[in-house]
Image (cartoon, helix red, strand yellow):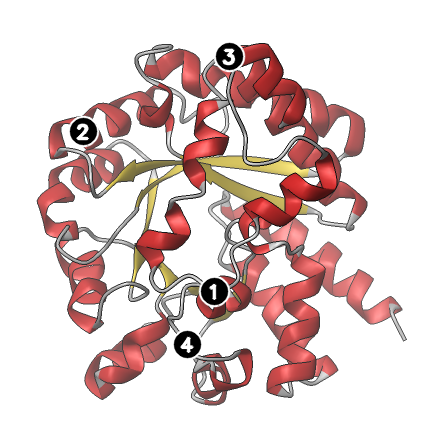
């Protein structure tokens, strides 16, 4: 960030790496909206194709060091317009990802996010651009950003277009707003995975529906604590969802803003929520089984991961 900021002439809240990492860390936000404010700095330094390619490459190198075998990384291409076109904003991270995959062997797919706070017409543009790259590494369309006051149903046409043209659909919901936000994501937008889904327990009928239909939940423990969606990790409803048989996966959300890796999230599930080794293995396998990959590729990856988990005593 420091190097990119210098190149772009962007002022950051600190001038050395350690202080900047601390300044970017969100520990005590009062809402999701406050948490999202930090992104103004990262977006500001990512307004060239070269910068986007670099951070995509370095991200994959980082997760490969964690023994991540497959990752789906999401970003909002519209945040880089008009500095570049939507096509350039997608091509740049795809180039970085390709280079890192060749070096590390870690498989990577891209999820293109539209933003609730932008107009539905921009979401439609993002969906169209994402579809154009569905054979190049873009696997899904997503809707992110502030939930409350920005209903997902307003963007339903973009989801329909993405789905009709071969992209999977996921949607951030049930974090900054309640169960109705999740219902919109599922029923109005056709999402087949839910980003967060933390608050589905507020509607037992919806909770049963999500569990019975095996709709994967993209749970982000640290982020939910930092945004005050839950008061503490130990109080997170993921324990309840796991016990109820829901398809639980663990994810990092903003690695920089939350100061976490995927390893940290797995460890938190174990130490704060009592997940056993067997349950951690189940969560890991759930994640691969829920991946937006062709069935044959997914089957091979799941078999590989099960073998590797079985080799860990």
Quick one: label 2 or label 3, which is nearer the N terminus?
Answer: 3
What percent of the width, then of the height, locates residue 55? Answer: 61, 27
* Disc sitting over residue 97 in the figure: none
C-alpha distance separating marks 3 and 4: 37 Å
Residue denoted by label 4 = 230
Disc 2 designates what residue? 124
Q: Earlier in the sequence, mark 4 or mark 1?
A: 1
Residue at 51 percent across and 55 percent down: it is: 26
Q: CA distance from mark 3 to mark 1?
A: 33 Å
At horizontal 30% and vertical 83% (from top left) the residue drawn is 201
Pointer 1 residue? 28
Position in image of residue 159 (x %, y %): 21, 41
In this picture, is 312 found above or below 150?
below
Nearer to us of marks 4 and 1 is 1
Q: Is residue 252 left or right of residue 182?
A: right
Left or right of residue 244: residue 305: right
């Amino acid at each position: 960030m420091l190097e990119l900021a210098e190149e772009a002439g962007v002022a950051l809240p600190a001038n050395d790496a350690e202080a900047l990492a601390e300044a970017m860390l969100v520990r005590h936000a009062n809402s999701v909206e406050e948490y999202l404010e930090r992104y103004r700095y990262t977006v500001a330094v990512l307004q060239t194709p070269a910068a986007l390619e670099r951070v995509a490459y370095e991200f994959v190198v980082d997760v490969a060091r964690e023994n991540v075998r497959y990752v789906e990384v999401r970003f909002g291409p519209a945040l880089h317009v008009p500095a570049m076109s939507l096509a350039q904003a997608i091509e740049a991270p795809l180039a970085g990802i390709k280079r890192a995959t060749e070096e590390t062997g870690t498989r990577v797919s891209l999820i293109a996010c539209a933003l609730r706070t932008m107009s539905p017409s921009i979401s439609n543009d993002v969906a169209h651009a994402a579809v154009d790259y569905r054979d190049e590494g873009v696997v899904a369309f997503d809707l992110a950003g502030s939930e409350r006051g920005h209903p997902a149903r307003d963007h339903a046409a973009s989801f329909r277009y993405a789905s009709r043209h071969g992209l999977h659909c996921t949607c951030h919901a049930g974090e900054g707003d309640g169960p109705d936000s999740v219902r919109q994501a599922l029923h109005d937008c056709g999402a087949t995975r839910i980003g967060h889904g933390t608050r589905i327990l507020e509607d037992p009928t919806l909770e049963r529906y999500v569990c019975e239909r095996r709709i994967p939940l993209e749970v982000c423990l640290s982020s939910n604590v930092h945004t005050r969606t839950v008061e503490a990790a130990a109080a997170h409803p993921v324990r309840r969802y796991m016990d109820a048989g829901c398809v639980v996966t663990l994810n990092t959300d903003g690695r920089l803003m939350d100061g976490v890796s995927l390893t940290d999230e797995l460890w938190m599930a174990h130490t704060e929520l009592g997940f056993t080794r067997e349950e951690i293995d189940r969560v890991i396998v759930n994640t691969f089984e829920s991946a937006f990959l062709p069935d044959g590729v997914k089957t091979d990856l799941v078999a590989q991961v099960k073998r590797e988990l079985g080799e860990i005593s």
